[in-house]
Image (spheres, rainbow, N blue to C red):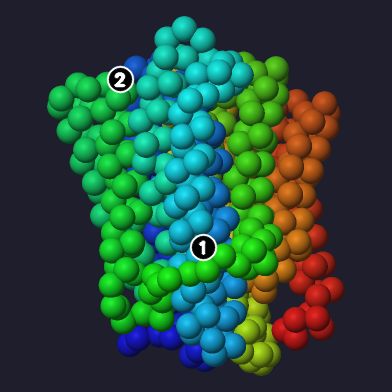
Amino acid sequence: MYIKLSDHFNFNRLLRFALPSIIMMVFTSLYSIVDGFFVSNFVGKTPFAAVNLIMPVLMILASVGFMFGAGGSALVSKTLGEGCREKAQRLFSLFIYCTAISGIVIAAVTFLFIRPLAVLLGAEGAVLDACVIYGRILLISLPLYMLQFEFQSFFITAEKPQLGLAITLICGITNMILDALFVAVFSWGLAGAAVATAISQILGGIIPVFYFSRPNSSQLRLTKAKLDGSALLKACANGSSELMSNISTSVVSILYNVQLMKYAGENGVAAYGVLMYVNMIFLGVFIGYSTGTAPIVSYHYGAKNHGELKSLLRKSLVIIGVLAVSMFLLAELSAKTLAGIFVSYDKELMAMTVRAFRIYSFSFLFSSVAVYGSSFFTALNDGLTSALISFLRTLLFQVGAVLILPIFLKIDGIWLSVVAAEMAAAALTLLFITAKRRKYCY
């Protein structure tokens, strides 16, 4: 049955509408892990180190598309809820065109300065050369990768989440197949892995352009657009939390690695790497649900359906609560198995990773609240509150915890710092939701 943004959402309909986005985010995490697997096992540890070094920079650049997607879709959904479809299409087109132009400019500038940028990150010798090769190939596809991020949000606004999922699956499977072909069969090395990823990113950006450029059954289509500075600023403000979250995550990861080298050496860094791989999948469930339901919130907020808005919030809090407990139990029960996939060859490292995972998994009980809360306020076009939640969660709380707790608890303090930060972020998010309930009538 076709589900519209204007529908009344019970638990069943809400989960069915969000399910494609959840699968999409989990699958994206999975094929990122497969990408790393091929580079590590078929190219070598030096190229793999280069990928891990330069990839956060590329993700920060690509997250500009996520910013326009999350912030722009909130504004477009609200406009649709107000009954202004033509205006919504003009805004949608404006955001897409601006992302494409900014992507070309960002890619060109970064292409020229990728070597000194890699040097600033600490790359030298063979690692530096590998960073430049991998980075420059992916910068060619960066504008379309930014559009891929953006269209993931707009497919939901267009009431076509299944189509967004299908394109993500096409891109992910393409990446996996080409990785195996270029790296394992043809032995093209790091460049082959980069080309495989670039081709999948190009597909992810170009297929939606063709879809929305032609007459389609959704509420959105690319049309002529005029410059609207206030709308662009509003979209950037709305989506600033998503941009801040990506930037902060990269900064915090660097700090965690520094602390782990101090307290546990290379084993600590390796254990943290395993946690981050698994964390991407588990958090993908929360991010997928939040992203998948955000346009519904924006639509009913714009339509002033306050009863439906209140119902959506209550149902979502129940759903993310159930998901949080499920993720925690799954993590605790499968800690040894998941750790063994990556580090079973080293008993000491295996023991450290299992212990770290069983401590870290408590964070899943709380992280869903901040992830959903930030997305909820973005959907309400309250970019400031959304950005505050993201900033305090990823920078202030996590940085403070990882600097203080290890002083008293050594390496266990590093694993517990994530739990403490997520608890503080969840409490702050619930405080914001309570304080602003009258303003937004939920």
Q: Residue 331: image x %, image y %?
A: 52, 49
**Whether residue 378 can be seen here:** no
Quarter of the image where the N terminus is located: bottom left
Question: In the displayed structure, does residue 46 sit left or right of residue 229?
Answer: left
Question: In the displayed structure, does residue 25 sit left or right of residue 229?
Answer: left
Question: In the displayed structure, does residue 235 sit left or right of residue 222?
Answer: right
Label located before the other in sequence (1 or 2):
2
Q: Residue furthest top?
A: 125
Quadrant in the rendering for residue 249:
top right
Query: Residue 288 versus residue 406: which sits nearer the camera?
Result: 288
Query: Mark 2: which secondary structure?
Result: loop
Residue neighbourhood size for the residue with mark 1, other residues' Cα within 10 Å, grouped as few (<14), some (14–19), many (≥20): many
Q: Residue 113: image x %, image y %?
A: 52, 24
Tell which tag, 1 or 2, sits nearer the viewer: 1
Count of picture labels: 2
Q: Residue 293: image x %, image y %?
A: 53, 73
Q: Residue at x 32, y 68 (%)?
A: 213
**Whether residue 58 can be seen here:** yes
Q: Which residue is drawn at 67% across and 85% down?
A: 310
Q: Is residue 147 above or below residue 399?
A: below
Quadrant in the rendering for residue 398:
top right
Residue neighbourhood size for the residue with mark 2, other residues' Cα within 10 Å, grouped as few (<14), some (14–19), many (≥20): many
Residue 43: mark in rendering: 2
Callout 2 amino acid: Val
Residue 281: mark in rendering: none
Query: Mark 1: which secondary structure?
Result: helix
- Label 1 – label 2 distance at C-alpha: 39 Å
Callout 1 amino acid: Phe
Q: Evaluate if marks 1 and 2 touch, with contact meaning CB atoms under 8 Å apart.
A: no
Q: Residue 95: image x %, image y %?
A: 51, 62
Q: Mark 1 points at which residue?
A: 95
